[in-house]
Image: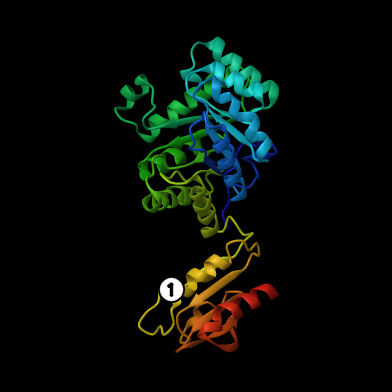
Amino acid sequence: MINRRKTKKIKLGNSFIGGDSPILVQSMLNIPAEDIERSVEQAKELAAAGCQVIRFAIPNEQALDLIEPIKNAVDVPLVADIHFDYRLALGAAERGIDKIRINPGNIGDESRVKAVADICKQKGIPIRIGVNSGSLEKEILAKYGSPTPEAMVESALYHASLLEKFDFNDIVISIKSSNVNTMISAYEFASERCDYPLHLGVTEAGTERMGIIKSAVGIGSLLTRGIGDTIRVSLSDEPVKEVFAAFDILKAIGLKNDCPYLISCPTCGRTKIDLIGLAKQVEEKLKDCKKPIKVAVMGCVVNGPGEAREADIGIAGGDGNGLIFKKGEILRKVPEDRLLDELMKEIEKL
């Protein structure tokens, strides 16, 4: 059982971040901001994949035209990613954005910070402060000598203090690094220093294979200690893959239970059926299943039902055939070419 850290609960569009709210999965559009039609299509793809928060860059005033079409296309909270220009934050708030990502220390004097804080407070729009190892203030970098976890947390809390000065507290903080150990330490330190919700991620994690591994280690280790309220798996790949990977991380540590959990053995010299191919077929068949069940695909009958005793349903391979078992109890023997169909029939009964 994971005991989650207690954080401030913040309203985000039709959802919430922090407190007792579920951990939300985020991703970001990677279509050029001027291409509204393709941006809308990608947002719809992300929503269909289950993405719970969608962020997109607002690099200029023209990009504000993205907000309304995307809001009309998906029922998912939208985040405007803004750097430096406070007027874009004001414009996004007026256009109906659900959340703004901006660092108050980078937008100019106090009057500009106050203007952003005031409109966001008036409209109930939270602000995410995003710090990473490449964005530290010169003074803080000089103080610590390098982008240490302590330096990044100090920077994040400095930006938060600028909003707090104007009585704005609906703040979410992210402190990302491409170095997994630095990222973990930074979030641990932040969780001790504030009760703001934390958005977890390993920035610039890489392409799909290594990016997922780094994210699973960084995000997963923090979540198991109760740290983190919303997550993004950053990949140099299609954003939909980020969503699938994020849900897989949540599933692996027991924080997502509204879908099947597949276990399968790595095979050995006793395996007499195409278990690897079979496991992939089962995984594909279960892709859209919403049942909270554990499904086992095991390589042999010697220890398959025993090792997977806790599985709700499973198969164990034999020599050209296999066993269907349920909670460790054998139901029947089935020819290899019927194993997948018979397994799916049993799953439908559950």
Any part of residue 126 in sight = no
**Residue nearer the viewer, 134 or 53:** 53
Residue 188 location (% of width, % of height): 46, 41
> Residue drawn 33% across and 25% down?
141
The quadrant of the picture occupied by the N terminus is bottom right
> Residue drawn 53% across and 33% down?
56
Horizontally, is 16 left or right of 110 in the view?
A: right
Q: Is residue 53 above or below residue 296?
A: above
> Residue drawn 43% across and 26% down?
155
Colour scheme of the picture: rainbow
**Residue nearer the viewer, 62 or 1:** 62
The quadrant of the picture occupied by the C terminus is bottom right
Residue 27 location (% of width, % of height): 53, 42
- Residue labelled with disc 1: 276
Q: Is residue 292 above or below residue 23?
A: below
> Residue drawn 48% across and 23% down?
83
